[in-house]
Image (cartoon, grey):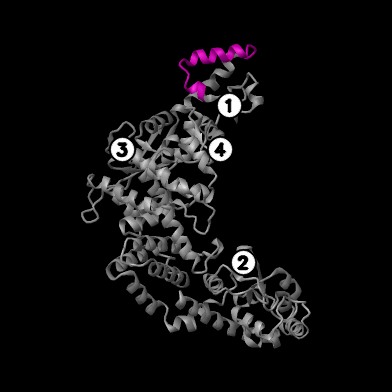
């Protein structure tokens, strides 16, 4: 069976299909990202007869149309949304939605004499030689009357010299654009592969985009669910667009969906700001127990997972499940309690979250556990905290994570979350992991490493102070972008036989410390600057930090997991120092994890 068909259709035909709903473009409700210059260039290419690339559509069975009917084979536009939206704006004169969700016109002018297009400006608007808005020609009742009016404004022009330009401009409506229509039997993976092979830029098709396109085909309900996802993600990042949505999308603003996310207008938390692809993945786990987005698309298409045949009676039920899951996900209580749970594990800043997939699965797990009324909130939070940290340390949600997600969901359902987590700990977090694998993983120069971030989270959880700080905590510095300092200063190491960045920028050589302390240490060896600290303890005269007792200094060393012999170390001891500290950091993280 052919996976696709290829046909040529005129611009006018395509725009008619979009208007009728036979070609669905959900992005019409989302901010238009093209500049007016790109719209101008698109018209110029069509005017000159240049190719403008293929559109790619995917057939969707049982989609609701704008007239209330059901399309036997509606086409979802999965590549070419911006081009079609640009044509609707320039030729049909329809508004686009800007980043503030306001409707605005993109007006393209044309000079029949110079045969050039331009974005309308006040100067062009005053120049009678220009057609200020080409949409007026394309939508004119009489082309003859339009041209007559133009020549009345430009009596000195020879009509014969520019009539050909008018003809070529009008012929844009008949310009042919190729459509590659993918068969409805194809799954997301196959569609994505075809997309990559066709797309000259090699840009992969986002499964989130694909799912969002599918969701929006289900009439007003589908479009509102898509908006629920889209607006939630925008409000989580930029709460101030709430007033724009209310003002510019009154129908959605009056819906119960908007009521469900109104709380985000006062949201100041940015630890977890999911994008729409993330929200779809969480909904898929919560509502359908599936990890692959392709499974969600199949459900919304009415495809029976056993027979692989389409049963349209399944479609409304699938949208019911999706809506229930989404309304649970965006609920203020659920979302905020999940974020607090992650923060209680010491991960207090977005920079510490190295895996959005780990956050997504942990949120889905939290929501699933919320359904178990026999479980206390404390136990629920404990499981979610440990799952998240375990995922960060093991990279459980990287690579082919969708299959892992489905396996985890099945086993959590069958065995219970606590029991399954215990089994994972026994296999993934064995003594070999803590004693060998984790110290080896700490042999990295990246401060973004999940292992170093887990170490910082452990410090935050323990209330640790910064290196050589008397009162300023690691948490306070994380919240205020504190300095990452080298225990053995990098300039000192470079001058002492460690010139490579990968040598001196080791996470086992990192600590968070106050800027003033960092500056005071400078490029001195530990045995030099620690002599100053000990002298300070003896005299009580502050010069490097504010620690004035030996007991407090030792406590600070324990909080920062610093080897005891640091006070006598030089560059010669650097390799031994790194080995010791990696093991100490691994043990510190282990204690932190066990105490979660």
Q: Earlier in the sequence, mark 3 or mark 2?
A: 3
Q: Earlier in the sequence, mark 4 or mark 3?
A: 4
- In terms of secondary structure, where does tag 1 sit? strand
Q: Nearer the viewer, mark 1 or mark 3?
A: 3
Find disc 3 in the rendering and name its residue: 64
Region of the chain picked out in magenta, as a range: 135-157
Residue 476, numbered label: 2
Residue 139, numbered label: none
Instruction: Give the distance between the C-alpha atoms of the residues marked 2 and 4, in whole angstroms.
Output: 46 Å
Residue 52 in sight in this render: no
Q: Earlier in the sequence, mark 2 or mark 4?
A: 4
* Image point (63%, 14%), residue name: 157
Instruction: Give the distance between the C-alpha atoms of the residues marked 1 and 3, in whole angstroms.
Output: 36 Å
Magenta span includes 138: yes
- In terms of secondary structure, where does tag 4 sit? helix
Instruction: Give the distance between the C-alpha atoms of the residues marked 2 and 1, in whole angstroms.
Output: 56 Å
Residue 109, numbered label: 1
Instruction: Give the distance between the C-alpha atoms of the residues marked 4 and 3, in whole angstroms.
Output: 32 Å
Counting from the top left corner in percent of width and height, residue 187 is at 32, 52
**Image height check: is 151 above or below 93?**
above
Q: Earlier in the sequence, mark 4 or mark 1?
A: 4
- In terms of secondary structure, where does tag 2 sit? helix
Q: Nearer the viewer, mark 2 or mark 4?
A: 2
Q: Quadrant of the C terminus?
A: bottom left
Counting from the top left corner in percent of width and height, residue 52 is at 48, 38
Mark 1–mark 3 CB contact (< 8 Å): no
Q: Residues within 10 Å of mark 2 (few under 14, many from 20)?
A: some
Find disc 4 in the rendering and name its residue: 38
Q: Nearer the viewer, residue 267 or 362?
A: 267
**Image height check: is 110 above or below 342?**
above
**Image height check: is 175 above or below 323?**
above
């Amino acid at each position: 069976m052919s996976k696709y068909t290829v046909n040529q259709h005129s611009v006018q035909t395509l725009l008619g299909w979009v208007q009728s709903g036979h070609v669905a473009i959900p992005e019409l409700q989302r901010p238009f990202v093209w500049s007016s210059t790109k719209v101008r260039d698109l018209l110029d290419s069509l005017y000159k007869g240049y190719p403008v690339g293929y559109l790619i559509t995917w057939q969707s069975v049982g989609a609701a149309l704008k007239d209330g009917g059901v399309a036997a084979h509606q086409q979802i536009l999965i590549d070419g949304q911006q081009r079609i939206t640009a044509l609707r704006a320039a030729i049909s004169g329809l508004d686009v939605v800007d980043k503030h969700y306001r409707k605005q016109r993109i007006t393209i002018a044309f000079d029949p004499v110079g045969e050039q297009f331009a974005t309308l400006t006040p100067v062009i608007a005053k120049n009678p030689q220009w057609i200020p808005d080409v949409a007026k020609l394309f939508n004119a009742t009489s082309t003859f009357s339009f041209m007559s009016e133009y020549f009345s404004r430009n009596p000195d022009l020879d009509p014969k010299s520019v009539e050909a330009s008018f003809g070529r401009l009008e012929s844009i409506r008949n310009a042919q654009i190729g459509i590659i229509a993918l068969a409805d039997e194809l799954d997301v993976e196959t569609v994505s592969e075809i997309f990559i092979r066709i797309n000259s830029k090699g840009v992969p098709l986002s499964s989130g985009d694909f799912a969002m396109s599918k969701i929006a085909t289900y009439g007003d309900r589908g479009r509102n669910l898509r908006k629920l996802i889209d607006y939630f993600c925008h409000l989580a990042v930029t709460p101030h667009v709430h007033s724009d949505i209310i003002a510019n999308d009154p129908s959605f603003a009056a819906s119960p969906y908007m009521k469900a996310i109104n709380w985000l207008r006062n949201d100041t938390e940015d630890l977890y700001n999911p994008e729409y692809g993330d929200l779809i993945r969480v909904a898929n786990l919560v509502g359908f127990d599936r990890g692959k987005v392709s499974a969600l698309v199949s459900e919304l298409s009415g495809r029976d997972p056993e027979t692989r045949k389409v049963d349209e009676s399944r479609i409304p039920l699938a949208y019911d499940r999706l809506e229930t899951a989404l309304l649970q996900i965006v609920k203020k209580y659920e979302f905020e309690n999940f974020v607090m749970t992650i923060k209680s594990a010491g991960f207090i800043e977005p920079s510490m979250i190295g895996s959005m997939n780990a956050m997504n699965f942990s949120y889905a797990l939290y929501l699933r556990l919320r359904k178990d009324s026999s479980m206390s909130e404390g136990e629920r939070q404990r499981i979610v905290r440990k799952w998240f940290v375990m995922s960060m340390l093991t990279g459980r949600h990287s690579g082919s994570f969708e299959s892992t997600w489905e396996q985890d969901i099945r086993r959590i359902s069958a065995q219970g979350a606590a029991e399954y987590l215990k089994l994972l700990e026994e296999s993934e977090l064995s003594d070999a992991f803590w004693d060998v694998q984790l110290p080896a993983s700490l042999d990295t120069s990246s401060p973004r490493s999940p292992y170093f971030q887990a170490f910082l989270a452990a410090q935050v959880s323990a209330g640790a102070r910064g290196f050589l700080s008397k009162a300023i905590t690691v948490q306070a510095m994380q919240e205020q972008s504190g300095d990452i300092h080298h225990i053995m200063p990098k300039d000192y190491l470079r001058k002492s036989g460690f010139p490579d960045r990968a040598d001196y920028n080791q996470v086992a050589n990192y600590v968070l410390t106050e800027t003033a302390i960092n500056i005071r240490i400078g490029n001195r060896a530990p045995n030099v600057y620690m002599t100053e600290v000990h002298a300070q303890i003896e005299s009580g005269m502050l010069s490097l930090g504010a620690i004035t007792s030996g007991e407090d200094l030792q406590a600070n060393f324990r909080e920062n997991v610093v080897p005891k012999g640091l006070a006598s170390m030089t560059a010669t001891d650097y390799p031994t120092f790194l080995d010791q500290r990696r093991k100490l950091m691994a043990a510190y993280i282990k204690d932190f994890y066990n105490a979660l």
